Amino acid sequence: MDKLFDISGRIILVTGSSQGIGLSIARGFARNGAKVILNGRDPEKLQKVVCELKGEGYDVMGYAFDVTNQTMVIKTVDIIEQEVGPIGVLVNNAGIHRRAPFESLSLSDWQMVMDTNLTSAFIVSQAVARYMIKRRQGKIINITSLNAEAARPTIANYCSAKGGLKMLTKSLATELGKYNIQANAIGPGYIETELTAVLAADPEFDSWVKKEVPLGRWGKTEDLIGAAIFLASPASDYVNGHTLYVDGGWQASL
Ligand code: NAP
């Protein structure tokens, strides 16, 4: 059988995977034979999904930590490397929204989104890359957004962080390529999760999405799994610094 998309046995850490896109990607990896480490801040919520996935027969475990806390991240990555094994793939997925009109956006909401959506990827990637560099092998996948390319009102913090994450992806690709580490990104369009629930509940926004997206619908979290498997597998060994948009064709149309 062709092993091009084979991720079985790979140890994969997905940050922010106790719900939404991260959980779907984690489940997709596990279903395809990877050993998946789930993460979130809330240990109880995390434990619940880990039990759920174990009940489905998957090889998963959970490590609760805050991706913005460098000390905690370094300590936990060390523990994972010792307790579980070599992290072969890292998915920087944890992200939040703090929406407000630009003129009233607080510095704390700006900073919180920057820390969670951008600085965290620097912190976790650095902690994991130190091990990947020694092994001369690894893959880093950052979850950016359509908002890395196009802005919307009330999310200047989010757009700036995601634009930065796109460039961090290129920087990692440029600097770590010599160690046989590939860094790429997935840019989801509008996907139905808790993060976008307030938008999906707004009939005007909902019909705007359905009108603008050539495929005529919101994305489902499962729509991201194929791209994640591609970027985690040998099939993408010469793909480096790229953002793969999974947006129903939004960016392709005016
Ligand atoms: P979500 O449903 O709100 O889930 C966010 C996850 O991140 C949760 O598991 C949460 O768990 C975790 N998290 C948040 N802050 C964290 C922190 N500091 N440390 C560790 N974990 C943390 O969000 P989603 O919609 O699945 O989004 C996932 C990613 O996709 C985000 O980066 C988002 O920007 C991106 N994205 C989403 C969409 C969309 O339409 N939904 C579109 C484009 C991009 P805890 O609360 O327990 O920490």
Image (spheres, rainbow, N blue to C red):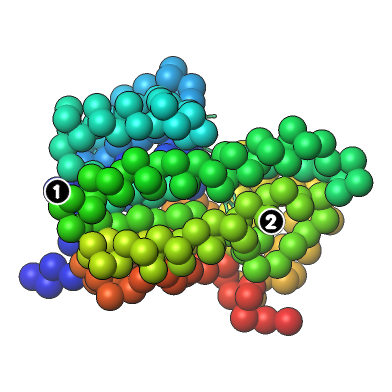
Tell whether label 1 touches label 2 (CB within 8 Å): no
Q: Which residue is situated farthest in the left direction here?
A: 1
The percent coordinates of residue 31 (x first, y second) are 25, 48
| Residue at left offset 40%, top offset 60% | 172
The percent coordinates of residue 198 (x first, y second) are 74, 42
Label ID, residue 169: none
Residue 117's image quarter?
top right
Q: Quadrant of ligand 1?
A: top right
User: Is residue 81 left or right of 25 when viewed as pictured?
Assistant: left
Residue 36's image quarter?
top left
The answer to whether residue 153 is above or below residue 77 is below
Tag 1 residue: 9
The amino acid marked with disc number 1 is Gly
Quadrant where the N terminus is found in the figure: bottom left
Tag 2 residue: 159
Dot 2: what SS?
helix
The amino acid marked with disc number 2 is Cys
Dot 1: what SS?
loop
Number of marks present in the image shown: 2
Q: Nearer the viewer, mark 2 or mark 1?
A: 2
- Can residue 34 be seen in the rendering of this structure? no
| Residue at left offset 74%, top offset 62% | 151
| Residue at left offset 78%, top offset 37% | 107
Q: Mark 2 packing: few (<14 Cα in 10 Å), some, or many (20+)?
A: many
| Residue at left offset 54%, top offset 62% | 166
Q: Which residue is situated farthest in the right direction here?
A: 103
The percent coordinates of residue 20 (x first, y second) are 51, 42
- Can residue 59 be seen in the rendering of this structure? yes
